[in-house]
Image: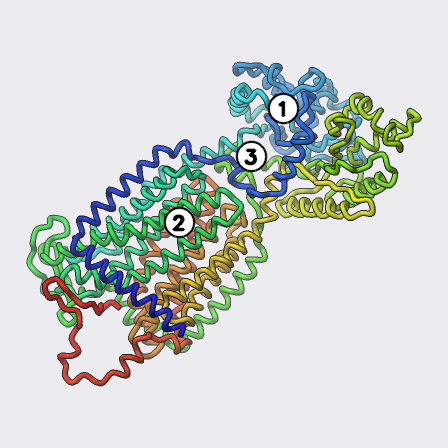
Amino acid sequence: MAKCKTDCIERPLSLAFEKLGGLVGRYPYVFLLSALCVAAALGAGFIFLQEREANDIEDQFTPVNGPAKWERAIVVDNFPQSEEFSQLRLASEGTYASFIITGLHGENILTEAAFKDIIELDTQVKSITSGNTFENLCAKTKGNCISNAILDIINYNAAEIISSTITYPMNDGTFLGTTIGGVELDRSELTSAKAVRLFYFLDEEKTVENSDWLDGFLKLLSNHTEQKTVHVSYFTSISRQNEFESNADSVIPLFSITYFLAITVSILSCLRLDCVRTKVWVAVCGVLSAGMAVLAGFGLLLFCGMPFAMTVATAPFLILGVGVDDMFIMISCWQKTEVHKAVEVRLAETYKEAGVSITITTLTDVLAFYIGLMTPFRSVQSFCMYTSTALLFCYVFNITFFGACLALNGRREKSNRHWLTCMTVPEATGDDGGCCVGGAYDKNTDKEFEMPIDSFFKNYYGPFLTRVWVKALVCLIYAGYLAASIYGCFQMQEGLDLKHLAADGSYVGSYYDKEDEFFSAFGPNVMLVIKDEDFQYWSPTARESLVLCLENFQNLTVANSSISPISWLSVYMQYGLNAGLSLNIETQFKRHLTAFLTQSGFSQDVNFTNNQIHASRMFVQTVNIRTAIDEKNMLNVFRETAEQCGKLQTPVDLIVYHPAFIYIDQYAVIVTNTIQNLVVATCAMLVISLLLIPNPLCSLWVTFAIASVIVGVAGFMAFWDVSLDSVSMINLVICIGFSVDFSAHISYAFVSSEKSSANEKAVDAITKLGYPIVQGAVSTIAGVVVLAAAKSYIFRTFFKIMFLVILFGAVHGVVFIPVFLTFLSTCSNSHEKTQQSLPEPRDASEQRVKAVVIQNKWIGDPDCY
């Protein structure tokens, strides 16, 4: 029954392509000019490119529905920004400039000479005048600019750094964990340090003026990175965004190199010594067709207002590979048609054979990318939408524009004209051809001579691969591949390191490296927000629950038990005890609260309006957050502890928040979303394969190939230092499409083969598609290899994973899948039984090719099929 269903879809589709091929062959100029006009018209959408660019890092590379964004909204609603600045209480990273000072040779930085340089730099920074002075723009507390604690401790006198006694990490109530790093202590006294960090916070409301000042800061520090005694790494709140946006410019010159390589590889792989049969212009048109697809697909979405993320810049490299791959399939089928038939008949036979195959791969590729729209990362959504749309146009232009080019080239060959001069040349008598003669073909089959590489696959590689001992060796190699891949999957790291969004050698990377090296002993100071308006702070029972809740946080391994939480409530209760107030009574508690908050500096920590406490917050210091895994674990354990607080006898309804959680949220969803996308896409591929490949069991092998390639790529990603993040997630989605490309082509050829045994079918499939698969793999790698030289992590990651996808996909297509298919004798062509039941022909005349041309009408039974 399943067999009937697949035939009912596959056969009509083949016949439809046959008719389309004949139509394109008869009216090539109509299809060629129509495709050019569509591409040109839609390509006009590129005028909107600049306004459609969406390069905001938070918007593109953090989960759309991340919990931290909801938590931030609660914080912003309940604790609006105060005129009195507090870094601890910021709901965002703030607007600031910063630099980290280290010794030139890693020596102790707490020296008089070093601090002379530090104070000199501080003076220069505060003297920057880019339209406004630092004094006018700085964030203030009690009318004064926020200062740096370490400079306040020594009173801006370098000599005092030797004589001052500094305790660490708390010094007279001031936290120095983010200011001094790489420390050595004598008990709690600071004896030496490797790094000092200074911050210069600006008033966030003065956006334009701040931008000019920060540009002045970057200009100043870029010229003072090396001084006599110290090294300076610098950073601003706009640096990461600026460096990220500049990444796209670095890859633009690579496009021209890529298309040159693609054209060169395509021409060389289609080149023949025969001056008539060579496919030089066809190869060029195949690459041009892929370029038109990018132009039309991107232009259409730009017209529609679709945001254009920087990750989309990698899509043209991918589109080129897919388009050229389909081109090779069509050329391969064209070469297997009889040269004396009319051009429209040859093209009809080509379409009948190649049409279903490239339709399967296009459907699976496009569907894989549309499934990628389910991901919560906008950068992935943008990439998938642009790529899938361009792939659809690539498919359309392949069967219109490229088909028309193939037909026109066929007319030239039919007239025996030179590929370059289009002058008629004498017909060659052998298969050698030359500059002055051409048009040779095999007199026995009336088809073009096989390419030498085709003969290799037919006469040597195919028979070699189907030997018993070779099959056993292939199975052994596959087992090793699978074992290594599964091991690698368990070694994979998660999350996108923000420094990777900047180009290699950027000052941003240097700053992050110094920060990781010297300032990872302490993590973020996490905000605990009690958002329950009905929480009775004056009730001893409620306070006991809150104290127990805070103790649970303090007892976490990621929290610093030696630093007490910053709690307005504990200070208020002590204040009431000292003043003899009965704060266990609601009226007394609320009556004295406003005065306390104003005097103590906790006014930003309690939303007390209309005589009701709507929300309040406290802070817990974290420690030893050194890696992405540490960040993920910290966030998970804090949220779990907050959930447990809500289950106490007197529930404490609270959330945890820090601005860094916006980015750490990616770790919470990246693995589950990647697995979800891969599973859904693989199931969808199975459905398509079952519908279009006329054998259910072989369709399962296609799905198996997808899973196998995904596991291989994911495992070897870890060996190549590629983490699982929103960038690599895109490429894993690509895995699905490309693994289908290779496995579907070879599986479809296998089940369509009219050979009798499984081994013969495998050899037949490899003969038909071995070279096109190799051509497609080489051309695609040529399309992305230039990205290996890119200075951006995003583009290099794309190259690494694409290389793995193409390598493993091609190996599955020409090694693993053919061998595995030979184990399935049930994978047979649906035509065989019918043919076997037919009576023997009465004479040889009935064995002639059924395709005949009578007044431009034909009945097709393609030889390529």
The disc placed on residue 42 is none
What secondary structure is marked by label 1?
strand
What secondary structure is marked by label 2?
helix
Q: Which residue is mark 1?
A: 201
Nearest the viewer among 791 and 410 is: 410
Q: How many numbered discs, if any?
A: 3
Which corner quadrant of the image does residue 486 belong to? Answer: bottom right
Nearest the viewer among 166 and 819 is: 819
Q: x%, y% of residue 182?
A: 69, 35
The numbered mark, 2 or 3, whose residue comes first in the sequence reads 2
Mark 3 or mark 1, whichever is nearer to me: 1
Q: Which residue is mark 2?
A: 388
Q: Is residue 837 left or right of residue 224?
A: left
What secondary structure is marked by label 3?
helix
Q: x%, y% of residue 778?
A: 34, 55
Amino acid type of the residue that numbered disc 1 sits on in the rendered structure: Phe
Amino acid type of the residue that numbered disc 2 sits on in the rendered structure: Ser
Q: Which residue is mark 3?
A: 510
Quadrant of the rendering where the C terminus is positioned: bottom left
